[in-house]
Image (spheres, coloured by chain):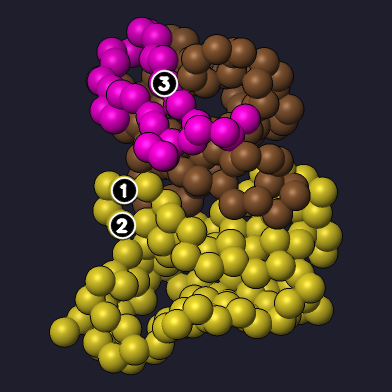
Chain colours: A brown, B yellow
Amino acid sequence: NAGVMQNPRHLVRRRGQEARLRCSPMKGHSHVYWYRQLPEEGLKFMVYLQKENIIDESGMPKERFSAEFPKEGPSILRIQQVVRGDSAAYFCASSPTSISMNTEAFFGQGTRLTVV
Amino acid sequence: GENVEQHPSTLSVQEGDSAVIKCTYSDSASNYFPWYKQELGKRPQLIIDIRSNVGEKKDQRIAVTLNKTAKHFSLHITETQPEDSAVYFCAAREGGGNKLTFGTGTQLKVEL
């Protein structure tokens, strides 16, 4: 089992460009969570998705950010018109069932986004 | 929503000493409390967790205690080693919810 795979590991974008971050959950996992980590800070919840559904997006900024988890393929976190404040590490986690059922969530290695 | 506070933000101990990190949470309905270790540039990894029906859990040199009445939980590392140096995050999950709310982290440094 390869674990949660995120790519790219590092992404540099100019202000105004789009950033696409990908997350392939562990085999057999259908629940995906995205977290953002600013330098010297903890992990902030952004969004929780199941296959083809957004379950909880209470942590997502209202504008420019979107997420999807299609029936086939990885989950995508998309940031449009990036600004310098978007620079952070973005972590994806997956679990086989909802973690409300006491199941551990496994994290990927993260994507470090730098906006220049 | 849930709010998790974590102290201290940095902690230096001598090798072999014990380290204690404390967290408080605000939502009395929270029922799951994991601890993650994150080494520089790496992913957070679960090291131990505790559920609200248990007061204490131990795994070799690591233990976690939970006081539901006071709404705080602590991580205890005994006989610390240099490889324990990392950032440690506590988290709490709201009862019936799906998202983990994390503390701001503790940078632990174990000195030789």
In the picture of the structure, the residue carrying the numbered disc 3 is: A21
Q: Which mark is residue B42?
A: 1
- Residue at 67% of width from left, 15% of height from top? A52
Q: CA distance from mark 3 to mark 2?
A: 22 Å
For residue A89, which quarter of the picture?
top left
> Is A55 positioned to the left or the right of B87 in the image?
right
Write the start and end of the magenta stretch as one range. A1-30
Judge the density around disc 2: few (<14), some (14-19), many (≥20) Cα neighbours within 10 Å.
Answer: some
Does dot 3 land on a helix, a strand or a loop?
Answer: strand
Q: CA distance from mark 2 to mark 1?
A: 5 Å
For residue B29, which quarter of the picture?
bottom right
Q: Amino acid at mark 1?
A: Lys
**Is disc 3 in contact with disc 2, using a CB cutoff of under 8 Å?**
no
Does dot 2 land on a helix, a strand or a loop?
Answer: loop
Q: CA distance from mark 3 to mark 1?
A: 17 Å
Instruction: Residue B82: give x, y in percent of width and height.
Output: 23, 76
Specify whether residue A72 is painted magenta: no
User: Label 2 marks which chain's residue?
Assistant: B
Q: Amino acid at mark 3?
A: Leu
Mark 2 and mark 1 on one chain: yes
Q: How many marks?
A: 3
In the picture of the structure, the residue carrying the numbered disc 2 is: B39
